[in-house]
Amino acid sequence: MSLKGKTLFITGGSRGIGLAIAVRAARDGANVTIAAKTAEPHPKLEGTIYTAAAEIEAAGGQCLPLVVDVREEQSVAEAIARTAETFGGIDIVVNNASAISLTNTQTTDMKRFDLMQQINTRGTFMVSKYAIPHLEKAQNPHILMLSPPLDMKTRWFAPHLAYSIAKYGMSLCVLGLSGELAPKGIAVNALWPRSTVATAAVRNLLGGEKMVQASRTPQMLAEAARMVFNKPARAFSGQFLIDDSFMAGEGVTDFTPYRVDPSVPLMPDFFVPEDDLPPQGVKGGF
């Protein structure tokens, strides 16, 4: 398996999961566009598109860092076009950019509601839309959403309705696009973590350092994503993958290297269906 020479367009890739996917691809010798808003250092968030580019290039890849707001159509269209022009095409799109607010209906202001819809659902739709003409020309084209299985249960919507609508909107794009693009040979899949992931969002919004210690690292999703991208696009599409189950199916038996602190029990993530059980007989699992 290798992504050498492949071109990835990753939204929200200046830190966290998006950056981990980019760096892992770069180790194979891939080209990566980092399409994100952070051009200047943020007091609470590590990394910019330029520090991300430095990491990607240090890992062995080429990087095009672009300031992109996935809510703005012209910004997205120009970034997609510039990526194809710079690297000679696009092979893989990763819709990673996402906004989160775990508030109930009465405490969710409409500006925040609109932001989540615009970034999560609309941004995913729009990035995919503009990438399709380039993906059609690729040898093994993939679109990957960092979004959950479509487990339409009250328990996932009642506590934070606005966020859930926006996040499941990304998964609905998988459901529709996988069928729409099947004749073109473009794979469209979703990938979601079984546990919380050690990112800035988990640290700043969900529970601080204690939650981070109960998490897996972004590198686990990066490895899983790489496995997805190496699947034959015409035969592997419309899948809603949970990271450890998918990786176990691909032969991974030890998840200990991805534990932030193996002595701390893992914290389950949102949106994992009750009947989707973790893999058995593996190290470092639940």
Image: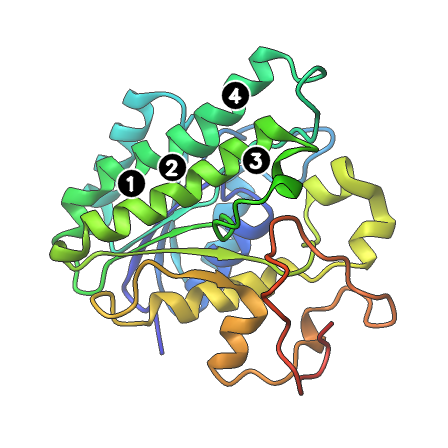
Task: Looking at the image, tell me whether mark 1 or mark 4 is earlier in sequence order.
Answer: 4
Task: Looking at the image, tell me whether mark 2 or mark 4 is earlier in sequence order.
Answer: 4
Depth order, front residue of 226/36: 226
Which residue is tagged 2? 124
SS for tag 2?
A: helix
Depth order, front residue of 54/208: 208
Report whether 186 appears left or right of 206: left
Name the residue rendered at 49%, 72% in the picture: 246
Calculate the distance from the C-alpha at mark 2 to the C-alpha at mark 3.
15 Å
Report whether 172 appears left or right of 154: left
Mark 1–mark 2 contact, CB under 8 Å?
A: yes
Task: Looking at the image, tell me whether mark 3 or mark 1 is earlier in sequence order.
Answer: 1
Q: Position of residue 238 (x, y in %)?
A: 33, 58
SS for tag 4?
A: helix
Depth order, front residue of 217/236: 236
Q: Could you say which disc has been placed on residue 128 in the image?
A: 1
Name the residue rendered at 87%, 51% in the picture: 210
Name the residue rendered at 44%, 36% in the picture: 169
SS for tag 3?
A: helix
Calculate the distance from the C-alpha at mark 1 to the C-alpha at mark 2.
6 Å
Which residue is tagged 3? 164
Looking at the rendered structure, the kind of residue marked 1 is Ser
Which residue is tagged 4? 115
Q: Is residue 107 above or below residue 40?
A: above
Work out whether residue 173 can be spotted: yes
Name the residue rendered at 83%, 43% in the picture: 208
Crowd rating for badge 4 (residues with CA inside 10 Å; few <14, some 14–19, many 20+): some
Report whether 262 appears left or right of 158: right
Q: Is residue 268 above or below residue 45?
A: below
Calculate the distance from the C-alpha at mark 1 to the C-alpha at mark 4.
19 Å
